[in-house]
Image (cartoon, rainbow, N blue to C red):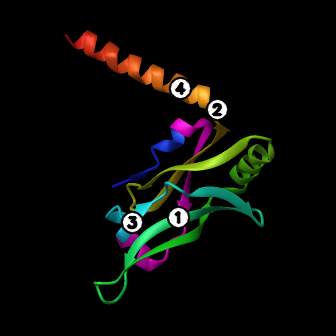
Amino acid sequence: MSIQNRRAKFDYEIKETYVAGIVLESNEVKPLRSGKASIQSSFINEQKGEIYINNFEIISRGKNFDLKKKTRSVKKLLLNKREIKKILGMLTTKGFTAVPMEIFFNEKGLAKVKFGVGIGKKKFDKRETIKQREWDRKRQRILKK
């Protein structure tokens, strides 16, 4: 089960992608495995020389199962120092931003975050992306016949 941010590639031109571990609490793993989380409005920034994901929403249950609570939290991402320096160098450049693209569990069962560093697209770039996508679909239909 993976949680995707489908708008990330549409809104941003991703230059580089990274995969990082994420620090979770024990009551957050089960809802994350069942797909009860969202990264649509989340973003990645730097605090005290470390990389964090903000507005990471997990819908967890309390002790009584009727009570569902949404928690928007800040989670630390686990990266090498070399990767952190490279990401921070890109983020200090004007126009670059880091956006989470996917949260998944690897083959060892560890939670990972795939995020990209890129530049935000302008409105005309987005229209060009839509035109290209529609042309690809039309071409596939023609070739299928």
The residue under the point 54% across, 60% down is: 21
Q: Which numbered disc flags the more N-terminal residue, 2 or 1?
A: 1
Q: Residues within 10 Å of mark 3 (few under 14, many from 20)?
A: many
What's the distance in space between the residues labelled 3 and 4, CA to CA?
34 Å
Q: Which residue is mark 1?
A: 56
The residue under the point 42% across, 24% down is: 133
What's the distance in space between the residues labelled 4 and 2, CA to CA?
9 Å
**C-beta proximity under 8 Å, tags 4 and 1:** no
Q: Residues within 10 Å of mark 4 (few under 14, many from 20)?
A: few
What's the distance in space between the residues labelled 3 and 1, CA to CA?
11 Å
- Residue 144 at x, y percent in the picture: 22, 13
Q: Which residue is mark 4?
A: 127
- Residue 100 at x, y percent in the picture: 55, 51
Q: Which numbered disc flags the more N-terminal residue, 4 or 1?
A: 1
Q: Nearer the viewer, mark 2 or mark 3?
A: 2
On screen, residue 113 above or below 26:
above
**C-beta proximity under 8 Å, tags 4 and 2:** no
Q: Which of the labelled discs sits on residue 32, or is there none?
A: 3
| Residue type at the position of mark 4 | Arg
Residue at disc 2, secondary structure:
loop
On screen, residue 6 above or below 58:
above
The quadrant of the picture occupied by the C terminus is top left
Q: Is residue 5 left or right of residue 51?
A: left
Q: Which residue is mark 2?
A: 122
The quadrant of the picture occupied by the N terminus is bottom left
| Residue type at the position of mark 1 | Phe
Residue at disc 1, secondary structure:
strand
The residues colored magenta run: 10-30
Q: Nearer the viewer, mark 2 or mark 1?
A: 2
> Which of 122/10 is in front?
122
On screen, residue 126 above or below 55:
above
Residue at disc 4, secondary structure:
helix
